Image: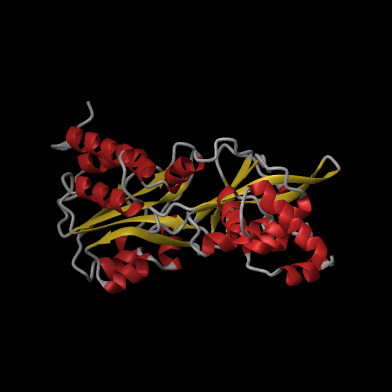
Amino acid sequence: MVEFPPGAFEVAVELGEIASGQGDLRQRADAVLGSLGRLVPFQAAVINLFDPERGVQAPIVCRGYDDATCGYITSRANTDEIELLGFTRSHSAMRLVDLPVPRHQVRGWAEYLEPAGFREGLAVGLFTSDGRHLGLLGINTDTAAHPTEASRDLIGRLAPLIASTIDPMRSIARVTEIVGDAEAGVLVAGGDTRPLPGLPAHVLLRAGSDVLGVAVERVANGYAYGSFLAPFTADGVPHVHVRITVLADPRDPSHPLSTGVVLLSPPGELYGLTPRELQVLGLIVEGWPNLRIADALSVTRRTVNAHVEHILTKLGAATRTLAAARSIRLGLYVPRPLHNT
């Protein structure tokens, strides 16, 4: 019969409520440590997310460590040590006494944790149900009596639930529900892109594409939500447009991975606007006057005037300022960098 520490059932229920509840990433991680503190009387603890772009463990929440130890936790040396000890492959929780190497050979312990007064600890890799390695949970105590074997085994069993609680994809999946007809999508983290579970790739969302460049710039500039149109030649037919929607999760600014998502979907209602009028709208949105638009498009000012009149009529706008506002709200324009794609 499996032996569980006192309060095990209550903590498991509590973690389930945290995993299914609201709050941003840091709040959920902090709540997890609060619950685990009822199982293990720890003096310090950390929950990390692995940031593949920088190749380091980035703490979501970190308690009780001095500055030197915190610096080591976020170093590449610590990330390498975590991998060498097997926490990126094994799903088992291990105490210091359980490690496959003597404790004096573990740099983080010998140079930082033990000198800081810690006597024991526990770590477990955090993996999603589909096998993605997210990061690490680590706790340290000032006594060799904790963590016990029973608490170690229970935390190991609870690790998948903890992983689901701090999985950035959880928030991203909720955000992508805003665009129900999305046909493709990517996760954007800085200049890096990653696939989104359940959505295929698309040539317009490949790294280095003009479309993705515009989207990444908008994420970097703090756009929480917005869309625009991108021209796309489909089956040899030019002047087809797709809608690009840029979403960020402003509730989770604390975690290092998810800065936004870029989704591709059908264009929706275009209000009869022609490909050229959608380009002109893109320049109106940027505040360009008609003469500058004419020069950029290599057409006469009279032609641009006609385009603007048609745009105002089709959008039911009295002024170009109102037309620009409506086109931004509806995502009815092609940004300037995409005019030649």
The quarter in which the C terminus is drawn is bottom right
Q: Is residue 305 left or right of residue 282?
A: right
Q: Say above or below: 131 vs 207.
A: above
Res 3 visible? yes
* Displayed quadrant of residue 188: bottom right
How many discs appear? 0
Q: Is residue 278 left or right of residue 59?
A: right
The quarter in which the N terminus is drawn is top left
Q: Is residue 148 left or right of residue 16?
A: left
Which residue, as the protein is rendered here, is positioned at the far bottom?
Answer: 68
- Residue nearest the observer in this picture, 10 or 99: 10
Residue at position x 72%, y 58% from top?
308
- Residue nearest the observer in this picture, 65 or 274: 274
Q: Residue 155: where, in percent of width, then height?
A: 27, 42
Q: Residue 48: where, in percent of width, then height?
A: 37, 56
Q: Residue 38: where, in percent of width, then height?
A: 16, 45
Which residue, as the protein is rendered here, is positioned at the far front?
Answer: 318
Q: Residue 73: where, in percent of width, then height?
A: 36, 65
Residue at position x 69%, y 70% from top?
289
Res 156 visible? no
Q: Say above or below: 140 vs 184.
A: below
Residue at position x 68%, y 56% from top?
211
